[in-house]
Amino acid sequence: MVSLEQVKLLETKVTKTIEHFKKVTEENTFLKGKLDSYQQRIDELEVLIKQFREDQSRIEDGILSALDRLNQFEDALESKLVQEKPGPSLYKPEERKSEPVKNTTPVAEEPEDDSGDLIVEFPSDMDSIDPSEPAPSRGPENELDIF
């Protein structure tokens, strides 16, 4: 026969099982809520990634367009230099005045021969530049402004 102790033990086990089931059900509901919030965040991030890729593509296209315009400008400048006749003070160093040159910017000259290569002549005071000295500052945080 079944004793009273066994019935009480069974009742205790059933109560514990019911409590455990409630706890597991609550945890399952909580985890499903977290899963839904994570899925929403994943969807938001996927949209951001898609926008980033589109923006990246537009940025690349803009940079390529700017480089193409720079190439066109360079080509136009070179063709203009070829079309213009050289002036005596720019293209014949022996006819220049004997004043010291203070500008360190290279001067482009047309070639004496018809090879098509540009000749760059640096000012005579380039020898006085110490290569161990730091270069002059280029702007905030030593960055070049290209736009």
Image: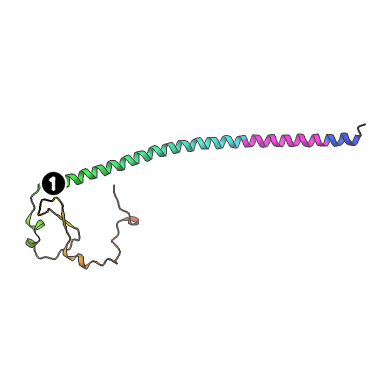
Q: Which residues are magenta?
A: 12-31
Q: Which residue shows up at 25% across the image and 42% down it?
A: 68
Residue 30 in the magenta stretch? The answer is yes
Main secondary-structure element of the magenta-colored stretch: helix
**Residue 5 pos. (x, y %):** 90, 37
Label 1 sits on residue: 80
- Comparing 95 with 97, the one in front is 95
What's the amino acid at mark 1? Answer: Lys
Q: Seen in the image, is 90 located left or right of residue 11?
A: left
Q: In what element is the residue under mark 1?
A: helix
Q: Seen in the image, is 95 located left or right of residue 53?
A: left
Q: Seen in the image, is 27 located left or right of residue 1?
A: left
Indicate whether 41 appears above or below 130.
above
In terms of image quadrants, where is residue 4? top right
Residue 89 in the magenta stretch? The answer is no
Crowding at dot 1, Cα within 10 Å, few <14 / some 14-19 / many 20+, comes out as few
Q: Which residue shows up at 21% across the image and 68% down it?
A: 128
